[in-house]
Amino acid sequence: MKNRLLILISFIALFSSCSDDFGNMNQDTKNPTTTSPDFLFTNAEKFMVDQVTSTSVNFNVFRLYAQQWAEVQYPQETQYDLTGRTIPDRHWATYYRDVLRDFKEAKTLLVEEKANYKGEAEGLVVIDNKIAIIDILTSYCYGILVDTFGDVPYTEALDIDAHPQPKYDDAQTIYRDLLAVLTAASHKLDQSVGSYGDADLIYGGNTAKWAKFANSLRLRMAIMMDDVDHTYATAQALAAQADGLILTSADGTYMPYATNTTNNNPLYLDLVASGRDDFVPANTFVDKLNALSDPRRPKYFTEFPEGSGLYKGGVYGTVNIYGDFSHITPTLKDPVYPGVLFTYSEVEFLLAEGVERGIFGGSAESHYNAAVTASLQDWGVAASDITTYLARTDVAYTTATGTWKQKIGEQAWISYYNRGFEAWTSYRRLDFPALVAPPVTFGDITEVPKRYSYPGIEQTLNAANLEAAVAKLGNNAVTTKLFWDKH
């Protein structure tokens, strides 16, 4: 699986260069009019994972907003300057232009292929499976957009001919439709038959695992909506659980990267190949792990001073000197280290939260323990150290400080290290850990951002619909809460 991306791209190159058919010499081969849906799917899948994995401040500042990392000589992003590098524009364009557009085109080609199909019956099932997986990942991407901005183009999006200026749909209405799409796609998948094979960089075409991912997304979205509509959220979460969730780390949603430079993990490109030293772990994060003697510290950070067994984070929101602090562990700098969309640990945290919200029966403590244990195991912590950690009075569910939101929120934040978007979203939903804005911020922002402001380019390309969305939201401020963020 590790070399799936390299193999696929090598195959494409070989296929493109080894034909003896000279009958197409008058065709413009550099600008093809058609392509394979599998190639479009692979391309979209990679851009999608790259976006949540990258640490380039031009694309992804979520590790910074979660206060897991701090910046060195250029602290603008930890001071909440989104406009200097037009970060919302790049985030928006990546999903709409580079990911969703390719998924839509791949689906169109698959629907045409199905309509003209004359092969064995199993081939039709494979096509249906491919379409269902596109629906799942399309829903995932729209969920990211809603959780970043609020109302976004949805029903009129991606159709420049019919809707060159698409309306912004209501965020909660989008959420409900995405849950319906995910449910239908999960049920549609025939788990006895494959799909994309090696063209699928995440699960290798394994439809059973895609169904678990879809159902786990449904669980997450249902939990997100609980403060808005408890009855609806309960029904959705119970249905997702009944259909089957990610319940082992082996079923987690990871995309391995390849050894060739074009397809290295973006973290390697940003932290190593760039030759730049722009980030250190944030004191906010490191201090919390130090207080807990968390055994993940040597997995997350290097020691400072080296060999001391101590860890020191850079001051969040200020200029830092790279050599004066712990650094990002070499583990994350591996060019083939996988990108992550969903983990078993996250599922267990959501289940613990669901118990506390009155959605599920059972024990929140047992799910909490399973979540923390899974995270520790994923980072290679020894079994004896896991037992010791869970027994600490400031970690054990019955004795740790605060409400269930604080207990789950703080441990989820620690477990979502290197998953900045999920860490930031969990913080926004639960209000824990109790993050505070640095003393100096862009525009005198006084709290951690709750959303991205809308892209500046929309004022030029889609002004009327943008202004309607801003008016509905009340303003375009980064501190305005999204529909599910009620407390």
Image (tube, grey):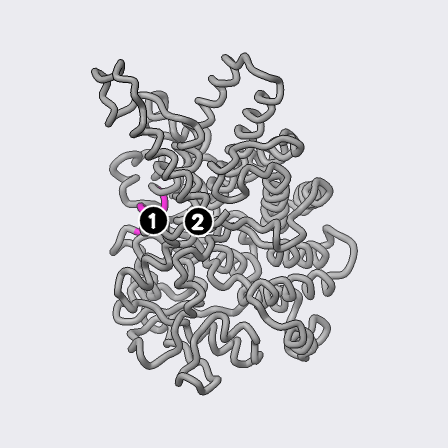
**What residue sits 66% from the left and 45% below the top?**
233
Name the amino acid, label 2: Thr
**What residue sits 45% from the left and 63% below the top?**
66
Frontmost residue, 375 versus 19: 19
What secondary structure do most residues of the magenta stretch adopt? helix
**What residue sits 78% from the left and 57% below the top?**
362
From the viewer's perspective, tell me whether residue 94 is left or right of residue 174.
left
State the image quarter where residue 27 is shown.
Answer: top left
Residue 88's disc is 1
In the rendered image, the quadrant that contains the C terminus is bottom right
Secondary element type, mark 2: helix
Q: Residue furthest front?
A: 20
| Residue 468 in the image, given as x and y percentages of width and height | 38, 37
| Residue 30 in the image, given as x and y percentages of width and height | 24, 27
Name the amino acid, label 1: Pro
Secondary element type, mark 1: helix
Work out whether residue 395 can be spotted: no
From the viewer's perspective, tell me whether residue 398 is left or right of residue 152.
right
State yes or no: residue 201 in magenta: no
| Residue under label 2 | 148
**What residue sits 65% from the left and 34% below the top?**
191
Q: Which residues are magenta?
A: 87-92
